[in-house]
Image: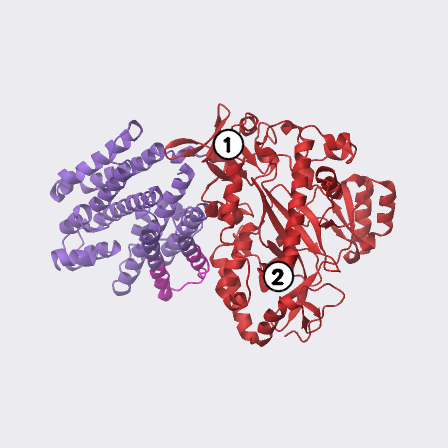
Chain colours: A red, B purple
Amino acid sequence: MFKTYETKSFFDEMLQEREKPRAHYQTLYNRLSTLPEDELQARHEAAQQNFLRQGITFTVYNDDQGAERTIPFDFVPNIIPKDEWLQLEKGLIQRVKALNLFLDDVYNDQQILKDGLIPRELVVTCKYFYPQVTKIKVPRRNHIFMAGIDLIKDENGEFRVLEDNLRNPSGLSYVFQNRYVMRHVFPDFLQDYNVVSLENQFTHIHDALSSIAPNNITMPNIVLLTPGVYNSAYFDHSFIAQQLGIELVEGRDLLVRDRIVYMKTTRGLKRVDVIYRRIDDEFLDPLEFRPDSMLGVAGLLDAYRAGNVTISNGIGNGVADDKAIYHYVPNMIRYYLGEDPIIRNVETYFLRDEEQRKYVLENLDQLVVKQTDGSGGYNLLIGPHATEQEREDYRVQIEKNPSNYIAQPMVTLSRMPVFRGEEFSGCHIDVRAFVFNGEHPHVFPGGLTRVALKEGSLVVNSSQGGGCKDTWVMTD
Amino acid sequence: MLSRVSNSLYWMSRNIERAENTARLISVRLIGSIEHKENHWDELISISGANEDFEKRYDKYDARSVMDFMSFSSDNPNSILNCVKLAREDARAIREIIPQELWEMMNSFYWEVKQYKYENWTVDSIDDFYQMIIRQSALFQGMVEATLSFDEAYLFIKMAKFIERAEKTSRILNIYYYRSEDPEHNDPSLYRHWFAVLQSVSGHEAYLKKHHPFITGERVIEFLLFDEAFPRSINYCLEQVYNVFQELENGKIEHYSEDLHQLIGEMRLDFKTMSVIDVITEDIHQFLQRFQSNCSQLGRLINKTYYLGEVGV
């Protein structure tokens, strides 16, 4: 089934060249080559069925028939050798440390702006910069309890950071479900390898949440705040709450009295100490942000200010994962930690800069252009794949509001095989790594490998036809 | 436990029980109508108290319309399809509270119901559908017993189930008693009638064991109201509700639970002190209607005592 598989000019995770797997994929390659096609097909279908039965679905919006879709799962795992992972871990911890210091800085003394390393204007005009939370004493100065760092491999096979997600990164539950399905439907694949287990990860995560409780209380009441069952990431929320053994609450389950947050139980009110929130900043508290928010809790920010409750991830984190600020993260690492960045960024052009804009507009057919506040893979221009008209439309948008855009060279994301019935075909992937920060930073082993299933596509987001794969970190 | 969670547990349980009861009620009628061409399909609609809603949508009370309305209609909040859908939505909202196995069962149940070809069902095959509903409900009950810790969550599920059951038995009895009063009934048809009533609550076998094949209206009423061992008699259900309440409150009466305690006490008193003769003499319809309005009050007081209604939607 690999006979027709071509690596082409891309970096392929599995194969060095045609029919020649990399060393750490050899065992899996042999197994895949010997299994009959119809058996693989049957197991592939059993895997998809598994997701539907468990209700790991997201709601398709604009469909009143209640259509629900599963995220397509591909059984060829992304395998990361031990040494490569250890190096990556160091780089991720370094990056999240610097980002956390940056957040603490911009919401307090703003030393980095005074020293001129990042243009002040870029920070204070950022849509996600919230002056409402300046000078708030955040427990342990921890703004980032959970970070999702999106990594890609360039054409030389070097890991690069594509994007930081410091607000509400989702997808952790899928990592566990991918492993679950792998264990049940493809146990033979797993048995061939020594893979870091995910079993005790929630102990770390729970510890991290407990460690940021206000006033160092020892047995904090921790809750996960969700927008509710209709949110597309609801499964993520519910799974994490269940695994952590914490209450999953909606805004309507909470109320604030005398600057203290309570949840409404069958036995009256119970005090809440730590809120791991999965709703966006602007919906948190109708008294401080959007007044029309039905999801939040009136008075929440006031309780936060009084130091009576921890809200995590911190409010206003969007200023650090903005696509324009991204360019400055390597500088932050040098500035705050005095170290060189271990994982490199992808080169970025600023369209607010006249010279760079000129270059970008002249080379639109070779670049990827993104909105600085965009997410989810929406509204980006992939120059080489766009039509003349699409590029022209984008050019008009850019000229109207240049500082709203950045451009990056077309990084050819690495590829790996995806099962297509009769054969395997190469699809682009990225990896969302998760970093948890409590008393000490902790990198979750592996993360979520997302794959762009549409032929030739570079967009891995599930809302845009992406799928996922299990991610194995080897122990030997 | 969060009030919203107990509210979801409560309604998940009631809706599953409701779907099962409706399925059994229709199934018994469907099988009975094969042999005897009697037509009182309107009774089924009366039992669920939905005549007005029904008449807005259908011209006549024929078998097909009634089954369609009670099984699949999205306009009928109590149709089997809607009950299962609502129960699954509640289960989903609390899937981190209930065991994974139970959630998967509910989820599969929903997909099975939803994928049923309900636009072009035939009378020959539809009973399979009702049997499936009854089986899935049994699976639900079994899983609740086998996988849930006996804590507050379990108690709310149990309480909801027995309230729903008691109310349904009462409604069935109330409507079916009217027909037994019909002077045109002869002995064999009365026998058949009461036998079907027993079947509608799965009580025919338990009844036969106790009373042998001597079926009279009076005895059936006694059995369905007062029997202490049959799991769908009102008396039995009420005792279960009382036991759950005692468990929830550790046998104590606090200020906040006083009203609820008193109401359950009054409802039990009727069943402890009255006999079937008293009930029939008093007028069974009045008796049952009083019981049903007490059930509604019971629901309101549970809401109030455990703040179930406190959470806005």
Q: Tag 2, which chain?
A: A
| Nearer-the-camera pick, A420 or A276 | A276
Q: Decide if residue B150 is on the left or right side of residue B196.
A: right
Bin the neighbour count of mark 2 within 10 Å (Cα to Cα): few under 14, some 14-19, many 20 and up.
Answer: many
Magenta: main secondary structure equals helix
Residue drawn at point x = 63 percent, y = 60 percent? A81
Q: Which residue is mark 1?
A: A216
* Residue toward you, A22 or A106: A22
Residue A71: mark: none
Chain label for disc 1: A
Q: Is residue B54 left or right of residue B179?
A: right
B248 on left or right of B95: left
What residue is drawn where x is 82% and y is 50%?
A392
Residue type, mark 2 in image: Asn
Which mark's residue is nearer the viewer, 1 or 2? Answer: 1
- Where residue A288 appears, as percent x and y from the top left, is 60, 28
Instruction: Determine if residue A129 is in view.
Output: yes
Label 1 close to label 2 by CB (< 8 Å): no
Marker disc for residue A78? 2
Secondary structure of the residue carrying numbered label 2: strand
The number of numbered discs placed on residues in the rendered structure image is: 2
Residue B294 included in the magenta stretch of the image: no
